[in-house]
Image (cartoon, grey):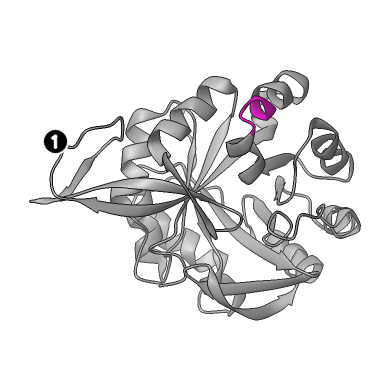
Amino acid sequence: MVLTKRIIPCLDVTEGRVVKGTQFVNLRDAGDAVELGAYYDEQGADELVFLDITASSDKRKILIDLVERTGEQVFIPFTVGGGLRTVEDIKGILRAGADKVSLNTAAVKNPQLISEASKIFGAQCIVTAIDAKRVYVDSRDIKGDNIIIEIEEGTYCWWEVYIHGGRTPTGEDAILWGLKATDLGSGEILLTSMDADGMKEGYDLELTRAFSERLSVPIIASGGAGNPEHIIEAFKKGKADAALAASIFHYDEYSIKYVKEECQKAGIPMRV
């Protein structure tokens, strides 16, 4: 059986409004979260990701009422993240209508949260979100455990994990953290390139491919989609299982239907 690739609009939310920025800053309004969620469901999105992007940095819990209202309007799989710190937080979000939860900051600080949640709710409900930024090095031969990739001839880098919505560097290698998260019971990785985010110049294909080739769970490529060709590249060159995008959908640059048609023309299996 051929597994279809997924197109996933992302709703970054703060104070109930969807926002979009560039490299995690300069946010601008993109509309009402509930209305956009329902709209993308009607348009044929395969899933939705809903991230409360200031919940962790503001040290507050996610907006449960917003999740409930969105869940009432959305009938496709729906992932929610932001400010989830405990198993009880996760239970509340799933009860409010989400199908999956996305863990980022709390999982880095307390990796056992992944294993505890996975045992209770199942790995299919636990998505580990990783915000990764390139760190360039002179060669492969530096001391330490970091996985260094030659991204083009003579150019090397590894990717550092950031938390608190991209505000705080951790010093941790993103690929190694992805492997650990998978071992702990995460069923999927939402992988965002901080370098490419909002730039509309394409995904970090080297990052996406490095994860796809090393991890045994589905990889959602995120950060950088500017047109359907970028999404096609994420599937073909980045070997992603799903492509997440925000700006191109929020501001009506491309419809989900059109993106799926272009992917199909390129030979990528899609749910129509």
Residue 61, image x, y percentages: 82, 52
Q: Is residue 202 left or right of residue 12?
A: left
Magenta segment, which residues?
110-114
Q: Nearer the viewer, residue 68 or 256?
A: 68
Residue 187 visible in the shown view: yes
The residue to which callout 1 is attached is 141
| Picture layout, residue 16 above or below residue 119 | below
Q: Is residue 262 left or right of residue 18?
A: left
Residue furthest out toward the front: 143
Q: Nearer the viewer, residue 17 or 262?
A: 17
Counting labels gives 1
Residue positioned 65% across, 22% down in the render: 115
Residue positioned 57% across, 71% down in the render: 249
Q: Is residue 184 left or right of residue 148?
A: right
Residue furthest out toward the left: 154
Magenta region, mostly helix, strand or loop?
A: helix
Query: Three-letter amino acid code at disc 1?
Result: Asp
Residue 12, image x, y percentages: 65, 64
